[in-house]
Image (cartoon, grey):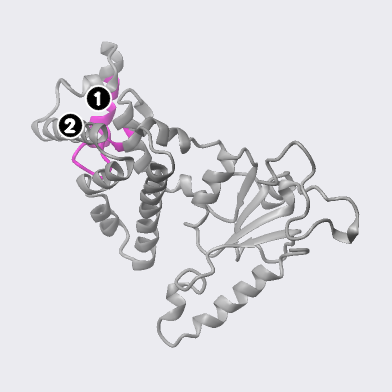
C-alpha cells in the first residue's frame, strides 16, 4: 500500500522516520520478498501487478512461465475464446492424445489455405487417417464439454474439471518419475486452483475476468541479476538467491512447517533442519532496517 500511494511520501513502516526527521519515502527497490520454494511467488506476482508495483523475480522461473501453468492457462483461454490460435496449438496434443506434430502442421496449413480459423477447421478436417481424425473429434468434444461447464460453474470448479478431464496429473506422473519434481508440478496446479478459489471468493465473475486478472506482463528472462536489481522494483527471490545481498525492508514469507523448514528436511535423520536454519538466518540478515 505504501508503494502505490503516489499522493505523499510514505513513512518507513513500523514506526515513523529513522533518525527522528521527516518521513522517508520507500522506493520499490528498497523492498525484498524472500521465500523458500519456487511456487510461493505466484500470489505476490499477481498482487503486485494488480497494485501497479514494479517487481523483478530473481533466481528462478516466474510461476507463470512454468510449463504446467502455461498449459492449464492455455486450456482456459481456448475455453473462453477458441479463436485464440497460439493457445489452441499449445493444447491440441497436450497431454498427448494422438495428434502428432505432422498432423498439427497439416491442420494449421489447411486452415490457412481455406481461410478458416483453426478451431473451425477442426470440425471438418480433410485427409486425416482414422486415428488422428478420431483424436481431433475427441479434442473438440472435450473443449465443448468444458465450455458448457464454464457456463454453469465457478472458475475454481472449471479449473478442477480441466485438470480432471484432461488427466493432466496422470501425465505429470508419467513425465516426472522423481517424486520431488512431480510434487513441485502438482503444487503449481494447486496454486492455479487456489487463485481461482480466491477469485471466486474475492470478487467472482466470468472466466474472462479471471484470465484478465492473470494477464502476464512480459519479462526479459535474459536480464542478469545485477541489471534486474538496478531497476526500481520490488525484488522477489528465493532465500538461496538472496545470499550476499541487503535491502532496507525484507519480508520473509511462508515461515511454517512444511515450507520453512521444508517438508523434505523433516524426513530421515533430520539433519536437513540445520540447512533450513541457515537459510532462515540468511533471510533475517538481509534486512538493513526492518
Mark 1 vs mark 2: in front: 2
Residue 212 percent across, percent down from the top left: 45, 32
Of the two numbered discs 1 and 2 on the same chain, state the one appearing first in sequence.
Answer: 1
128 inside magenta stretch: no
Q: Quadrant of the C terminus?
A: bottom right
Q: Secondary structure at mark 2?
A: helix
> Mark 1: few, some, or many residues within 10 Å (few <14, many ≥20)?
many
Toward the bottom, the furthest residue is 269
Toward the left, the furthest residue is 130
Question: Residue 119 shows which numbered tag?
Answer: none
Q: Nearer the viewer, residue 47 or 215?
A: 47
104 inside magenta stretch: yes
User: In terms of image quadrants, where is residue 238?
Assistant: bottom right
Give the residue pinned by disc 1. 107
Q: Is residue 72 above or below residue 141?
A: below
Residue 255 percent across, percent down from the top left: 54, 69
Indicate left or right for 178 with 280 as reference: left
Q: Is residue 24 above or below residue 36?
A: above
Give the residue pinned by disc 2. 136
Q: Secondary structure at mark 1?
A: helix
User: Which contiguous range is marked in magenta?
Assistant: 88-109
Mark 1–mark 2 contact, CB under 8 Å? yes
Q: Nearer the viewer, residue 194 or 22?
A: 22
The residue at 46%/85% (across/down) is 270
Q: Is residue 210 above or below residue 166?
A: above
User: In terms of image quadrants, where is residue 184?
Assistant: bottom left
Residue 34 percent across, percent down from the top left: 61, 61
Amino acid at each position: 500500500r505504501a508503494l502505490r500511494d503516489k499522493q505523499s511520501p510514505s513513512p518507513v513502516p513500523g514506526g515513523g522516520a529513522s533518525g527522528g526527521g521527516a518521513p522517508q519515502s520507500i522506493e520499490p527497490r528498497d523492498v525484498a520478498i524472500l521465500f523458500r520454494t519456487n511456487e510461493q511467488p505466484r500470489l505476490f506476482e499477481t498482487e503486485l501487478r494488480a497494485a501497479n508495483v514494479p517487481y523483478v523475480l530473481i533466481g528462478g522461473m516466474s510461476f507463470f512461465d512454468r510449463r504446467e501453468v502455461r498449459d492449464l492457462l492455455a486450456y482456459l483461454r481456448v475455453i473462453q475464446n477458441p479463436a485464440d490460435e497460439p493457445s489452441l496449438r499449445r493444447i491440441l496434443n497436450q497431454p498427448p492424445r494422438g495428434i502428432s506434430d505432422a498432423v498439427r502442421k497439416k491442420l494449421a496449413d489447411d486452415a490457412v489455405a481455406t481461410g478458416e480459423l483453426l478451431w473451425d477447421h477442426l470440425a471438418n478436417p480433410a485427409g486425416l487417417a482414422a486415428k488422428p481424425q478420431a483424436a481431433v473429434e475427441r479434442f473438440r468434444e472435450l473443449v465443448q464439454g468444458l465450455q458448457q461447464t464454464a457456463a454453469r460453474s465457478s472458475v475454481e470448479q472449471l479449473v478442477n474439471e480441466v485438470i480432471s478431464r484432461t488427466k493432466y496429473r496422470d501425465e505429470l506422473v508419467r513425465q516426472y518419475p522423481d517424486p520431488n519434481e512431480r510434487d513441485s508440478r502438482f503444487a503449481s496446479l494447486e496454486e492455479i486452483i487456489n487463485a481461482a478459489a480466491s477469485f471466486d471468493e474475492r470478487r467472482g465473475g466470468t472466466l474472462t475476468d479471471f484470465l484478465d486478472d492473470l494477464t502476464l506482463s512480459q519479462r526479459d528472462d535474459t536480464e542478469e541479476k545485477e541489471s534486474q536489481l538496478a531497476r526500481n522494483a520490488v525484488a522477489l527471490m528465493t532465500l538461496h538467491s538472496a545470499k550476499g545481498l541487503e535491502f532496507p525492508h525484507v519480508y520473509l514469507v511462508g515461515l511454517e512447517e512444511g515450507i520453512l523448514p521444508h517438508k523434505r528436511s523433516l524426513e530421515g535423520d533430520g539433519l536437513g533442519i540445520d540447512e533450513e536454519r541457515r537459510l532462515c538466518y540468511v533471510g533475517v540478515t538481509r534486512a538493513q532496517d526492518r
